[in-house]
Amino acid sequence: MRQFSHFLSDLWRSASDLRFYQEVAALPFGVVCRHFLMVAVIFGTILAVLVAVLLVFMSNLWLWCRDNLPRVTIKDGEAHAEVTQPYLIERKMGDKANFAVVIDTTGKTEGVDPRYNGGVLIARMAVTFKLGDMSIKRDLAEVKNLSIDKNYFNGLIVGYWRIAIYV
């Protein structure tokens, strides 16, 4: 019978060597089922941890947005905000400002400043997302009526007890 110490090498060989399956075909059915069950448990655990980390990250992001962003109203494809514009909010990690949210519905700002690793520009007719060198622009023409405020972000926040249920 195979030992658990062989399991990790078998796992690697099953992904990298097709001859491994000839050996598996010669093994008793119970051994093969145990092997695949262990593979499923390991991958399921890894996936559950990744989902939990993603949910915690996203919830923290929504909390930050709720606490830092002013109300933005989108009506008939046009964004409006009751703040002096351009309005800049920086998210600092250590000494550097890694992320910025810019609200400028006047059209003066073209994009997120290159000194930021990432950011969001909310313009009158579009929202631009920047991550590194990649930039994605989303037209607001399809949005008829949306208010982005504290209540909006409260609806997006996932409680930690829910994360445990999801996972």
Image (tube, rainbow, N blue to C red):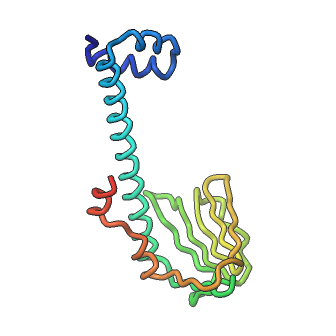
Quick check: 34 left or right of 106?
left
Residue 96 at x, y percent in the picture: 50, 58
Quick one: 65 or 3, which is closer to the camera? 3
Q: Would you say 10 lies left or right of 18 here?
A: left
- Quarter in which the N terminus is drawn: top left
Residue shown at 56% from the left, 71% from the top: 101
- Residue 160 placement (x, y as % from top left): 29, 62
- Check the image and name the residue furthest to the front: 29
**Residue 113 appears left or right of 45:** right
Q: Residue at x 38, y 17 (%)?
A: 9
Residue 52: image x %, image y %? Answer: 36, 52
Q: How many marks?
A: 0
State which quadrant residue 143 falls in. Answer: bottom right
Rendered image quadrant of residue 129: bottom right
Viewer-closest of 64 and 99:
64
Q: Is residue 133 above or below residue 77?
A: above
Q: Residue 38 appears in which quarter of the rendering?
A: top left
The residue lying at 48 percent from left, 82 percent from top is 149
In the visual, does 33 lie left or right of 25? left
Residue in front for this viewpoint, 67 or 17: 17
Residue 87 percent across, percent down from the top left:
59, 79
